[in-house]
Amino acid sequence: MADMGTCTTPFCNAGWAEVLSHMSPYGYANFGIAFGLGFSVVGAAWGIWLTGSSLVGAAVKAPRIRSKNLISVIFCEATAIYGVIMAIILANKVKKPEQEAFQFEENWDFPSFYFAGYGMFSAGLSVGLTNIASGVSVGIAGSSCAIADAQDPSLFVKILIVEIFASALGIFGIIVGIIESNACTFPIAGIEQE
Amino acid sequence: MTTKVQMVHGGMTDFNIYHGYPEALVRGMRCSFLSDADYHHLTQCESLDDIKLNLAESDYSAAVADSDNLTPSGFQGVAVQKMVTEFTYLRTQCVEPLSTFLDFITYEYMIENIMLLLKGALSGRNINELLAQCHPLGMFKASTMRSIPTFEPNARGFADLYQTVLVDTPVGPYFAMFLQESSEKGGGAVRNVIEEVEIEIIKSSLIKYWIEDFYQFCMKLGGDTAEIMGELLKVRADTNAINITLNSFGTSLNEPAMRISDRKRLYPSVGHLYPAGTAMLADVSNEEELGRVLELFPAYSGIWNIHSTGNDKSIDDAFYERDVQQLELAFEGQMHFGVFYAYVKLKEQEIRNLVWITECVLQQQKDEIEKFVPVFSFHAPWRGGKKK
């Protein structure tokens, strides 16, 4: 059933499926890099302000916790580093074609072209979203760790174990991302035929 | 360009934006309470000099170092001043809605101070003496405080006092509600003279309005704060209702005519005892009937048994013990405002303990000295330890 508003000429897209499948793989790959880095940094920053504000407050009455509890902040920072690693790996894989032309050459390797675009998008997203969860989780645990350490120093190591498990979530993301993006290569020229 | 003030309470993921620093501060102050070892040393003291020496080794060291007033009230003044300094520091570090929450805690002291001034004016005491006795957390400007005892002690004077002085204070709305209620109560039967016993009734009414207002505010905040503060305020309201009933035996408030019209109005409308329990309490005329009503509520039947078996503990001690147990629980969870209220109340309990111990040492009553409720003690009955 055609709406009055949608255009039906061949110049328009026939729905979202066409929009999504016609987006350039270069676009997908670069968005993957942006999401991967951006979401990781959001997660890391979120975790740092969650734990930092509690650390500063608890250190007023118990100054000895200052240095030890910076480990929580370092764990949060690690999630941002995973994002940067993934972004650098992906950014190095995006290549432009050797020959400038209006259209792709004949025998352009379209399968691996699209595979690379989608694969890098997914790798970036997997790193970014897992790092948000990991960053927030480490932040909340770190905040409780600082407050508990101020009362009883023996609790520090035990709560640190909780934080280690929380930051393992970010490692899962980057492992899957690397495995996925390994197989992605952008073609730079048409397949040569003997 | 003015930005709208944000009233963000926050859940687990964003509480720390606005309230992370004050909350961590107040949790750090948890280690400033006197420990079991401190209490042990204090109870072994022979003189007030020893007490000052022992306090100098606890968190009170800076506070007692400057004071030479070695009397129980001197120690109390020093301890209260320390708590007020800490509270003021917390109050300056926080934003909405935590600042409103902390203000609510001070309103109780404001009501107490105003009632103290009015009562003192009736018995003709010196204004400076009265001002020295006021709690620092509930002070207004000096000019406001000095003008309160100058009003006439009758219904007209009270209305004048409200119009000119109290309406600008944060507790003004509670006085407005009280005046409205007492004018509704009866044209002909309005009391013309405000006597001492009626100051107590006015205070109970004002505290009732304060508890209800505070409760509504906490419920609006939602989350863990609503849960924890709701429980604490309900228990507070029930304690008030039971105390009002108990203290009314033997006074004019216990007469059948007065019970429904006057005493029932003093019961707060929050709490586990509301509405069925307070309706029953309104009819109670002696301790036996009160006991029978409280049997129906398991939380209070235990406390009532302590009172009725008449051993060393009074009902106030039983209430204090139960309060300390619940307030300590407020420190168990993170990311809520209950810790601030619990901190102030537990500090108050500690100050009460200090005064008790110094009085016992002064009067050389060593067998009474153990009758205090320590805060965060490892020997507390609810921690599985045996009370010494």
Image (cartoon, rainbow, N blue to C red):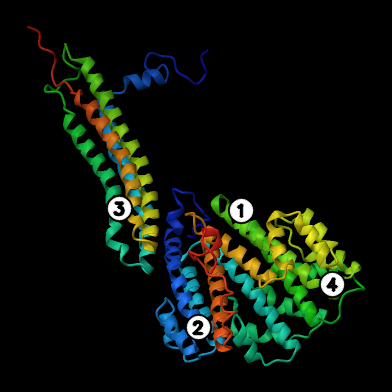
Q: Nearer the viewer, mark 2 or mark 3?
A: 2
Q: Is residue A62 visible?
A: yes
- On whether disc 4 and disc 3 are found on a single subunit, the reply is no
Residue at image position (91%, 68%) is B257
Rendered location of residue A158, percent (x, y): 34, 51
Specify the farthest residue to the left: A194
For disc 3, the marked residue is A73
Chain of the residue where label 4 is placed in the rendered structure: B
Residue under pointer 4: B253
Q: Chain of mark 3?
A: A
Are marks 4 and 1 in one subunit? yes
Task: Kindly report the distance in space between the C-alpha atoms of the residues bearing marks 4 and 1.
Answer: 35 Å
Is residue B243 depicted above or below B55 in this figure? above
Identify the residue position indicated by label 2 in the image.
Answer: B78
The reply to whether discs 2 and 4 touch (Cβ–Cβ < 8 Å) is: no
Q: Secondary structure at mark 3?
A: helix
Label 4: element kind = helix
Does the rendering let one see residue B330? no
User: How crowded is the residue under tag 1: few (<14 C-alpha within 10 Å), some, or many (20+)?
Assistant: few
Specify the amino acid type for callout 3. Answer: Val
Q: What type is the residue that disc 2 sits on?
A: Val
Q: Which badge, 1 or 2, comes first in the chain's sequence? A: 2
Find residue A176 and report its image quarter: top left
